[in-house]
Image (cartoon, helix red, strand yellow):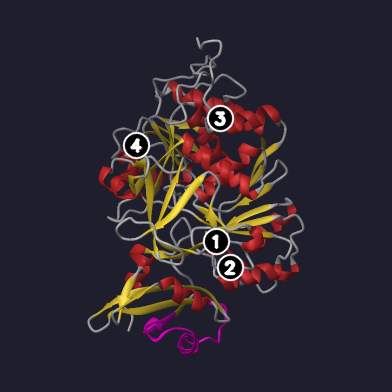
């Protein structure tokens, strides 16, 4: 029994629990035809936690969520947290080999998935000895349980909120009752892991970014403060929950008591826009790809978005020309340019009132955080000197799961005894007023004709050409040049030619930055987080003339 003056730790599941107490009947989540209140989600999450505990899930065990954006994914996440376990949100586009690698890497004990994904899950689960059970959503009449270890149907768990549950004990040795084994006095404290988010690794294998409850609570509080979120905010999220930017839309809204309209993607822009207007959406998070698609719509200006209060952009810098177009179409909407990386969630934001004056900037470090720029020897540099960005704050990850050498490369000793700061691997410059300007990823920089090239500078130039909606630049190894500059551009003009684009570059870029070859393509390959997959472009570039 806890002492009388016991101070309960503040954990991520408290976002939901406190909103459920304060706003029990308010709609928290709109997903397809479902409209769930805070009270309903809290109740369902409690029973998910109960089932996990009865399955033997222990404190800090890892539990996977392999689902599309859905109510089940959100409920599962909070249920896992309530069971004092660690949730792993997996990209719904993942294939068996990668899924198997991650399940084994962090030894997932239970997996939430959908019947539509069993063809991917079954071979992966067969090679995952740590996996005790699979909880399956979807139409139970269409679920093939062959090859699934200890399968449990989500529909049965969902009914557990109303009735005692019997999960076909004749085919399994476990049965569930309404006798609760859930520990209501949480064992976890805010230094314990809440999630592991897998990102692309330099070796080709995903790296698991370990984030504690404190990391997420700190980042969420800072972002909410500068976006000035409030209870009447309605956020439409089309970004995958496996992408931390998408995940935080739910976490933050549940913290301040808002509503999330959860969509699976931005594949059908007109449908999303109609949903924004219908649900009176006030906040819309996006990435450059989404805004390029929006701006490519011929009649976007016929929608006035009367309720929309703000939009945010991260994952990659939004070209200045796109910002200018958005400002023209949405003059009443605040635009926040931001920069972040999974290892610390968010680094900086540009106050909306600065967007016209500094469209190329990603702002200053966010609240409760310090940022600075260092040279190759780790010494701080002055204004307008390019160097690596360093981040200090409670939002900085604990490290990479099972990768001590990679962790040591990114987290290095800070100024004060015992602390570690994050070396981002990104090149920036900072002006005299402290505003940050992204230059490039260290790994993306290359030399041509003996000079260092920042692909970002060329991409900005390409996007400024009328009709170019998106662009990416890579270096193609060349015996004479060292690297040849190769550009890929997307255009919404049928009459655009490579010569047109090249002429624009010749007029606006230094000679060594002008692309040796330009390809007009229908789309650019993207990772699940919205960033351009430049490795895929390098393979495409191998065939370039």
Disc on res. 433: 1
Q: Looking at the image, is mark 3 or mark 4 earlier in the sequence?
A: 3
Disc on res. 120: none
Mark nearer the viewer, 2 or 1 = 1
Could you give the CA–CA distance between mark 3 and mark 4, rounded to whole angstroms?
A: 38 Å
Q: Are marks 3 and 4 in contact (CB under 8 Å)?
A: no
Mark nearer the viewer, 3 or 2 = 2
Q: Looking at the image, is mark 2 or mark 1 earlier in the sequence?
A: 2
- Above/below status of 432 relative to 98: below
- Above/below status of 122 relative to 321: above
- Badge 1: how crowded within 10 Å, few (<14), some, or many (20+)? few
Disc on res. 45: 3
Could you give the CA–CA distance between mark 4 and mark 2, rounded to whole angstroms?
A: 38 Å
Q: Residue at x 74, y 65 (%)?
A: 303
- Badge 3: how crowded within 10 Å, few (<14), some, or many (20+)? many
Mark nearer the viewer, 4 or 2 = 4
| Residue where numbered disc 4 is placed | 418
Q: Looking at the image, is mark 4 or mark 2 earlier in the sequence?
A: 2
Question: What is the secondary structure assignment of the residue under circle 1?
Answer: loop
Could you give the CA–CA distance between mark 3 and mark 1, rounded to whole angstroms?
A: 46 Å
Q: Nearer the viewer, residue 227 or 248?
A: 227
Q: Looking at the image, is mark 4 or mark 1 earlier in the sequence?
A: 4
Magenta segment range?
491-519
Could you give the CA–CA distance between mark 2 and mark 1, rounded to whole angstroms?
A: 15 Å
On whether residue 145 falls in the magenta region, the answer is: no
- Above/below status of 398 relative to 351: above
Could you give the CA–CA distance between mark 3 and mark 2, rounded to whole angstroms?
A: 42 Å
Q: Nearer the viewer, residue 90 or 201?
A: 201
| Residue where numbered disc 2 is placed | 359
């Amino acid at each position: 029994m806890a002492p009388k003056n016991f101070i309960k730790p503040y954990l991520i599941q408290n976002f939901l629990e406190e909103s459920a107490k304060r706003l029990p009947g308010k709609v928290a989540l709109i997903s397809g035809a479902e409209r769930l209140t805070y009270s309903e989600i809290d109740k369902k999450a409690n029973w998910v936690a109960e089932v996990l505990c009865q399955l033997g899930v222990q404190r800090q065990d890892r539990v996977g969520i392999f689902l599309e954006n859905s109510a089940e994914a959100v409920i599962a996440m909070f249920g896992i947290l309530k069971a004092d376990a660690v949730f792993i949100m997996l990209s719904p586009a993942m294939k068996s080999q990668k899924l198997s690698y991650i399940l084994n890497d962090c030894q997932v004990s239970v997996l939430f998935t959908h019947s539509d994904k069993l063809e991917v899950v079954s071979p992966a689960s067969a090679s995952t000895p740590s996996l005790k059970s699979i909880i399956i959503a979807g139409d139970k009449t269409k679920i093939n349980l062959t090859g699934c270890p200890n399968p449990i149907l989500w529909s049965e768990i969902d009914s557990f909120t109303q009735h005692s549950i019997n999960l076909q004990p004749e085919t399994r040795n476990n049965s569930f009752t309404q006798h609760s084994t859930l520990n209501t006095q949480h064992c976890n404290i805010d230094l314990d892991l809440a999630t592991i988010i897998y990102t692309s690794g330099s070796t080709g294998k995903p790296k698991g970014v370990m984030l504690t409850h404190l990391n997420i609570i700190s980042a969420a509080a800072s972002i909410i403060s500068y976006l000035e979120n409030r209870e009447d905010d309605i956020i439409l999220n089309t970004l995958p929950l496996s992408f931390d930017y998408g995940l935080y839309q739910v976490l933050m809204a549940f913290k301040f008591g808002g509503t999330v309209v959860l969509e699976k993607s931005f594949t059908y822009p007109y449908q999303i826009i109609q949903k924004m207007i219908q649900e009176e959406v006030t906040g819309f998070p996006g990435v450059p790809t989404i805004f390029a698609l929006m701006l490519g719509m011929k009649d976007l200006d016929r929608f006035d978005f009367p309720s929309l209060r703000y939009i945010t952009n991260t994952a990659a810098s939004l070209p200045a020309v796109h910002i200018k177009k958005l400002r023209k179409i949405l003059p009443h909407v605040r635009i926040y340019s931001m920069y972040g990386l999974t290892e610390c969630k968010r680094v900086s934001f540009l106050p909306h009132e600065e967007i016209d004056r500094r469209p190329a900037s990603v702002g200053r470090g966010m609240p409760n955080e310090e940022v600075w720029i260092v040279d190759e020897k780790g010494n701080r540099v002055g204004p307008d000197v390019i160097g690596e960005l360093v981040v200090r704050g409670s939002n900085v990850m604990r490290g990479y799961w099972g990768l001590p050498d990679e962790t040591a490369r990114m987290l290095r000793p800070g100024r004060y005894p015992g602390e570690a700061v994050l070396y981002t691997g990104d090149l920036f410059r900072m002006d005299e007023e402290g505003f940050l300007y992204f230059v490039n990823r260290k790994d993306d920089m290359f030399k041509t004709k003996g000079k260092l090239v920042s692909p970002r500078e060329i991409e900005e130039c390409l996007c400024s050409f009328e009709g170019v909606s998106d662009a990416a630049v890579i270096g193609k190894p060349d015996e004479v040049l060292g690297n040849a500059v190769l550009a890929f551009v997307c255009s919404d003009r049928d009459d655009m030619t490579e010569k047109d684009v090249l002429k624009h570059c010749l007029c606006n870029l230094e000679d060594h930055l002008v692309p040796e070859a330009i390809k007009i393509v229908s789309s650019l390959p993207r990772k699940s987080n919205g960033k351009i997959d430049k490795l895929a472009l390098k393979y495409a570039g191998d065939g370039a003339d």
